[in-house]
Structure formats: C-alpha cells, structure tokens
Amino acid sequence: MNAGEANTAAVVAAAGIGRRMGKRMPKQLLELGGKPILLRTLETLERMPEIGCVVVAAGQNILHDVAKAVDSWGLTKVVNIVEGGAQRQDTVWRGLAAVPEYAEIVMVHDAVRPFVSASKIRETIEAAAEHGAAILAVRPRSTIKRGAGDRIEATLDRDGLWEVQTPQAFRRDILMAAYAKAMAEGFYATDDAALVERTGIEVAVVEGEERNIKITTPLDLRIAAAILEEEG
Amino acid sequence: MNAGEANTAAVVAAAGIGRRMGKRMPKQLLELGGKPILLRTLETLERMPEIGCVVVAAGQNILHDVAKAVDSWGLTKVVNIVEGGAQRQDTVWRGLAAVPEYAEIVMVHDAVRPFVSASKIRETIEAAAEHGAAILAVRPRSTIKRGAGDRIEATLDRDGLWEVQTPQAFRRDILMAAYAKAMAEGFYATDDAALVERTGIEVAVVEGEERNIKITTPLDLRIAAAILEEEG
C-alpha cells in the first residue's frame, strides 16, 4: 500500500464535556499558545498526504460550539462533523458511520492529544495497513500493581506493559466489524483496540512519545504549555 | 500508635545519575523555582512531627555533591548521608543500614518527588503502622495493555490497577526482613513494596495525588515548574 494514497480517514473524538477542566468552554476549544487545542490536532492531520478526510465527532452538549469553531477554521479535509453519544465509544461509533466509502484505513484520535507527531501517526497507519490493527503506546514509567480494594495483589512485570495512546488505526472492515459486535452486545471498553482484540484480531504496537499527552485537567493544560515551550 | 511520636525514619533515595536529564549536575540538586529539588523534599520531611530522622542515600558518583549540599542546608533531622550502590535497591539497602535503632516505621521516598504533601505522607505512615506495609499510588489515567514483543496480548482491567509512587512505608522489621531476603537472593524489583510482597506480607494502598511526579527528564522539570506555578 502506498502511504501517499490518501486512503486513510481520521475520526477525531471530541467527546468529553471537560468536567475535570473546571471551565465552561469545551476543553477541545481551550487555547494553547494562542490556538485552540482541536485546531492544533486537526492541522497536523490536514498536512498529512496519507489522510484523505477527517470526521470530527463531538459530544452532544458541545456539538454546536465545536461545529461552529471547525467551520470557521476552513480546513479542507474535514468532511463531517457529527453528533456523538453519551460515552466516547458511542461518539466514535457515530463518527465511523460518517466515514466516506473510499477509506480503507480508519484511524481514531483524541481531539485533546495535539502533540502527536505526523511521523508517529504515519507509523501507526502503516502498521495498520500491514497488520490490520495498530496502536500507539508508551512504556509505563511507573511500577504498575494490581490490587483488590485497598490491598495489593501483585506487582506486574513492567517489561510487557504498554500505556495506550491514540491514534489507533485499523483496516476499516476490521474496525467496523469489531464496533458492530461490541455495540450489539453492549460491550464498552476504554479504547478502540480492545473491541478489535475481542474479535480475535491481533493488534500491533508502535512505540510512541511521552509528549503525546491527553489534555483533560487544568494541570494538563499547564503541562501542555510547558511542552509547547520546550518545542519552541 | 500516636502519629506525633517521631518514631518514623525516612530514607530518601537520591540514587539516579540523571542520564536522561542531560545535565552535569545531579538532577536532585537542580533548582526548581530557585530551590534545589532535594531541599524541597527534605523540607517537607523536616516539618513533619511524625518523622524523627532522615537518611539520605546517594549514588556513589553524586555522593560528594549531594553531601556537600545537604550539609550546607543545616536541616536538623538529616542524621546520615550514605553512599549508595549501583542500583536504586542497593542504595536504599545501604540507607536502611544507617537508620537509627529507635525507628519503628521506615518510609522510603524518592528525592526527586518534591511535590508529595505532608498529609499523604502521614496517611501512608499511619497505614503502615496499622497494616505493616503501605504505598502511595494513583489510578492509571491510560488504558494499560500487556504485550509480547510488538503485539498486544490483553487489555488489563483498569479498575484493579495502581500506578505506584513513593513514599512507601513499612514496619521496620518487615522491611528489613524483605530486603535481607531479596539481597541474599539477588532479587531486584522496581519498588520496595515488591520485596515485601514476595515475603507474603499484604501491602495496603493509600490513594495519592497526580502532582506527586518523579522528576527525571528535562520535560519533567518543565512540568514541575508548571505544578509549582499552579500551586502559586
């Protein structure tokens, strides 16, 4: 598959209502270095020749604000802005329904991860084209333990662990089948790949970067400003 | 046990040589808001009535710099500055050997976690006094998966997972027995509690705070500055 083919669609999940941010404006529209977070994310996708189109799926309560903002930015690749559902998974599901027919690969990305690099997105798309499913992830920096209540049961072997990020990319047929099955069965997971895993498809990992943080709290916003400063 | 008894000793692990920081000065001595990171950490311990004494254990290659700095700060509770070993576990082990006899509880803390609050240290010490062993930990914010090579094997149930921080506190006899066993057997782990767990002792969890980060990279240092700014 030629990476320049523009056969990839991106679904950008702008679901969260930002309860933890403590602001009235949707967190996706908060400014970071004078530019809304969502715009930063969409600009990275806009610049990538592999990506043919972008669907923005926004939570019901922020749809109006997000749609108005995205329209005003005049990005050429955003083909649809759709109303999401109650949970992230519902929102992505509705976004998937709005992906144009020609897309062979679909990548799902969090709106509030503006620091992902084009090269890491590219690696993830290429891994999905090759293996069917791929996610970006980093090694946990901390020891991870499993517990029951407030007691530790075991310390997990850190070597095998991954801390999951987005984008996650899939062959379209694989992702649609996995979502259709999960939604039909009422199965909810915390990421898209988990739905694919339970259909028996193997998911590949592309090692990501620490700075691809998810901005969900006021502290995250300050951290994001620090990252931006470091890059500057 | 009365929490005001000053029967707790703190071992502060200032082990790392700071390879990832890319600076010549030990990362523990880098300034944050005009004050060395290690001094911030030690000042928090100095102010707590529960803590009777502090042992600083520093890696061999930074011992001279750390000892000189700690001496210059004139803290009343630092009773020993000892030379550590090749790995963090070796360093803590040597620190434990320098803990005064009277201490009934020993807490181990990373020098480069200056943002831990006195109240969370207190909760951890109290839980250790009650249960024998306790650690500070937070819920992972990301989905955690287990993999083999570059393939995902399973998505872990996030409900039971903990991301481990310090301090970790223990009844002195429990920690000494666990360390003696591990060192005799050449067993190395990524945290102190793992050594205690393998002796069959149950470890309690105290829910910590996000801001209790471990400062190990230049980006962490910027994040730390952002946290400091947020605290005002």
Image (cartoon, coloured by chain):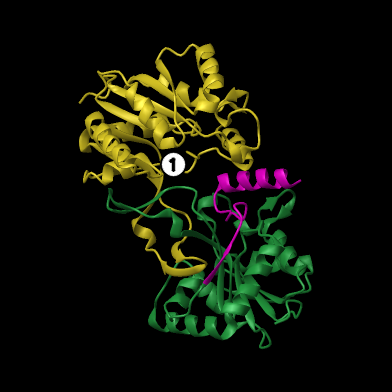
Chain colours: A green, B yellow
Name which residue lies at 26% across and 38% down: B181
Mark 1 is on which residue type? Glu
- Label 1 resides on the chain identified as B
Numbered range of the magenta stretch: A204-232
Q: Is residue B213 above or below residue B85?
A: below
Name which residue lies at 79% across and 73% down: A76
Which image quadrant for residue B89?
A: top left
Name which residue lies at 31% across and 34% down: B169
Q: Is residue A105 above or below residue B139?
A: below
Instruction: Answer few, some or many: residues within 10 Å of disc 1's Cα (few below 14, many 20 plus, some between 14 and 19).
Output: some
Q: Was residue A48 drawn as part of the magenta stretch in this picture?
A: no
Whole-percent x, y for residue B120 in the image: 38, 34
Whole-percent x, y for residue B217 in the image: 60, 41
Task: Confirm whether residue A56 shows in the render.
Answer: no
Which image quadrant for residue A74?
A: bottom right
Whole-percent x, y for residue B203 in the image: 27, 43
- Determine whether, in the image, residue A28 is placed left or right of residue B179: right
Q: Was residue A228 drawn as part of the magenta stretch in this picture?
A: yes
Foreground residue among B229 and A230: A230
Name which residue lies at 78% across and 67% down: A47
- Determine whether, in the image, residue B110 is placed left or right of residue B98: right
Which image quadrant for residue A222?
A: top right
Whole-percent x, y for residue B88 in the image: 44, 36
Callout 1: helix, strand or loop?
loop
Disc 1 target residue? B209
Q: Is residue A70 above or below residue A148?
A: below
